Amino acid sequence: MFRNKIIFVAICAGALLVAATQAGLAQDAGWPPPGSLKVEGAPNQKTTPPATSGPIRLQAIPIEPQTPPEVVTPNSSANQFEHHDDILSLPRILGHQWSFTREYPPENLISERYMRSTDTAARGLTLKEAIFIALRNNPSLKAAELTPVGAVETIREANGSFDPNLTSQIDEIKSTAPTTSVLQTGGSDAFTQKLYDWNFGINKVSALTNGTWGVIFDNERTFSNSAFASVNPSYNPTLALSVSQPLLQNFGWKFATINVEIAESGQMESQWNYGQSLQDFVQRIGNEYWAVVLAEENLEVARAALRFNQDLVRQNAISVKVGTLAPIDLQEAQSAEATSEANVYTAEANLRSSRAQLRQDVMLNPQDTFLPEEIEPITRPNPQEQIVIDHERALELAVQYRPSLGGLRESIRNSLLQVHFAENQVLPQLNIGAQIGLTSTAGKTLCTPSLGTPTIDSGNCTPKPSIADPIPPVNSGNRLPFNGIYGNALDRMWSFGFYSYAAVITFSMPLDNAVARAALAQARVSYEQSRLTYRAALSQAVVDVQSGLANLYADYKRAQATASATYYARQSLHDEQVRFRVGMATTHDLLQFQEEQVSAEGNQVQAETDLENAKLALYHADGTLLQQYQINFQVQDPHEVPWYAAF
């Protein structure tokens, strides 16, 4: 009975206290605005308090539906960087090479006006939309995309060794020298000779045998005042075919194209590395996206705590004024209010920083301004999503789809090709060569005096009669049967009457062959090193997958537990507020329960965003992160055979 009386008296006292507090609030007009802070050294100066309400999220504009970006890099991606100008553009290129003006890249020209430009729009994006836009716009990812594109040109450069090489030479040479013999020029004091050459040739390395064949077509016109030149001027065409074939070193089944295979393997490895960069980038965008969500939720929690403490300060101030509460309770509430206000400032700064990082990585900039549009996350954490955990399946996916492992496997193949090449270089050089040529001559044939017994044939000639000797002698000279023009020389060449041939065998080998043996040892070391690196990466992949599964399971359970903790903390704070109103709890007790609720809410927000990041980490570990967002990445076969590399 006595206990019931005490409870009744306490309830009446609590009711009177609440009524007095409300009356005091109605009469108090001079109380400082909530959240004002006094700066030390300036008692009348106040800073603007942080907002305790209002929209945290931006007024975002929706965006049109986004389709998955194209992330594969076929060989055609390199065409835009190649030289496709025709021969008519050569004067322009030559003029550009000799231009006195200096070019500067646009990035070196800094414009203050451009640096002040900002796209003030904000876009509400889901996580998938943010990833799609970032994959299209982010410059760092675009730079990584160019690595396999540049590797395509390495393949074409390797194929270029089979490109036929055309050569030509056209010249005119004249020389005049003093005569050293009266017989050389028939009395002239100068020996004059003039040469004209127009030579053409083509040579090619065979993509089948690694041999080299060539065809040359040389032409020479010679004129001189020599008395011994029986054909003067003379035309001398020559057609020759040559072949050089290695038999040991640089020879073997498909060995001619081994450098092309090595380049193709390197290009595929660069594609795998680009795929890993894609996965890393998608995970980074996801982490930044959830960082913004976490910062928004933390700011909301901090603002709610500030509102609570501001209300508590107002209530305690009134209670102190009416004499129902000790000043120490007001001071404790004011200390909690200042602390929560500082927490709001910190949360606002974290939100701005997170938004800036996400904005710059997504790079949604349709207006081409210095600062792109702000990004407002639309997707919220979903801790209720059912998660199926399969350890064996996750490990199988990691080995099959993880791009870093694919790149290392291609690196092993590349190292094996290097070993194959180095083994061939240990062999001695044994080459065979052959050459066959045709030649002829034509020109103006002169009558040459006969030496010894004259030969009577159709080539005999008779000099013209002179005044001193009007009757020419009989059988006074001979004439070579090569009279004619350049066309006659070509006709005579195809008669195969004048030819040459040669056959050559060459052998070469260093006595100790130290360079080749050292290169082979290095190639084998590199091959073994790449295998061990792959084995280490495979072990790390197992660790990443198992850690990802463990973290995902733990974060899933943690999200459920923190949700329960938040629920009970709110109920406890509500009950403590009831006790505080009736005088059964102190300000210190109430603030402790309020701190527990703020801590529980912060833990819940952190756990839910950690759960989303754990999903990203697991998909990243098992190599299926791109597939989760319908990003079609496939390694393209870089093999291509230009017409000149087919034979």
Image: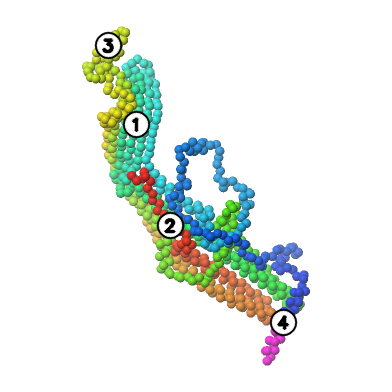
Label 2 crowd (10 A; few <14 / some 14-19 / many >=20) = few
Measured from the top left, where is residue 148 in percent x and y? 45, 52
Measured from the top left, where is residue 625 in percent x and y? 47, 62
**Residue 218 — which label?**
1
Position of residue 467 in the picture relative to residue 41 (left or right): left
The amino acid on which the numbered mark 3 sits, given as a three-letter code, is Pro
Label 3–label 2 contact, CB within 8 A:
no
Position of residue 601 in the picture relative to residue 44 (left or right): left
For the point 37% across and 55% down, the residue is: 413
Q: Which residues are magenta?
A: 1-17
394 versus 187 height, above or below: below
Q: CA distance from mark 4 to mark 3?
A: 160 Å
The amino acid on which the numbered mark 1 sits, given as a three-letter code, is Asp
**Residue 634 — which label?**
2
**Residue 472 — which label?**
3
**Residue 15 — which label?**
4
Q: CA distance from mark 1 to mark 2?
A: 53 Å
Label 4–label 1 contact, CB within 8 A:
no
Give the secondary structure at mark 4. Answer: helix
Image quadrant occupied by the C terminus = top left
The amino acid on which the numbered mark 4 sits, given as a three-letter code, is Ala
Q: CA distance from mark 3 to mark 2?
A: 93 Å
Q: CA distance from mark 4 to mark 2?
A: 73 Å
- Residue 393 is drawn in which quadrant? bottom left
Mark earlier in primary sequence (1, 2): 1
Position of residue 601 in the picture relative to residue 5 (left or right): left
